[in-house]
Image (cartoon, rainbow, N blue to C red):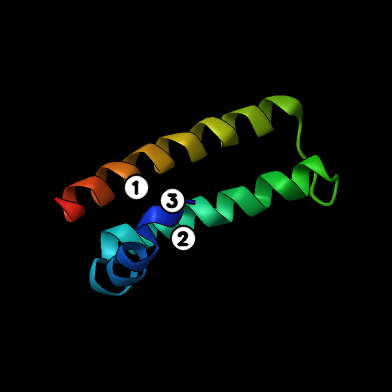
Amino acid sequence: MFPEYRDLISRLKTQDPHFARLFNEHNDLDQKIKNMEAHIEPGSPDEIETLKKTKLRLKDELYGLLKAAAA
């Protein structure tokens, strides 16, 4: 996610608790979605869709924080 901001992401994960929490939440959701789609964890298509929307909202918020920190 956002390879152009790799160094900034590493720095923010250690210096900004809010960014770190959002980043970890995004990664946790990504894994949960993958597990549901692979039928490792139970989940209906509606649940998966809801999780994907939440993940996208987090990604948008993370991108906004990255752009602001890079400016």
Q: Residue at x 65, y 54 (%)?
A: 31
Tell me which amino acid carries mark 1.
Leu
x%, y% of residue 24? 46, 60
**Which callout, 2 or 3, points at the residue further toward the start of the chain?**
3
**In the rendered image of this protein, does residue 52 appear above or below residue 23?**
above
Which residue does the numbered mark 3 point to in the structure image? Answer: 2
Q: Nearer the viewer, residue 10 or 44?
A: 10
What separation in Å lies between label 2 and label 3 (alpha carbons)? 15 Å
Q: Are marks 2 and 1 in contact (CB under 8 Å)?
A: no
Mark identifier at residue 24:
2
**In the rendered image of this protein, does residue 51 appear above or below residue 29?**
above
What separation in Å lies between label 3 and label 1 (alpha carbons)? 10 Å
Which residue does the numbered mark 1 point to in the structure image? Answer: 62
Instruction: Tell me the element at label 1.
Output: helix
What separation in Å lies between label 2 and label 1 (alpha carbons)? 11 Å
Tell me which amino acid carries mark 2.
Asn
**In the rendered image of this protein, does residue 54 appear above or below residue 16?**
above
Residue closest to the far bottom: 14
Res 59 quadrant in image: top left
Q: Residue at x 41, y 35 (%)?
A: 57
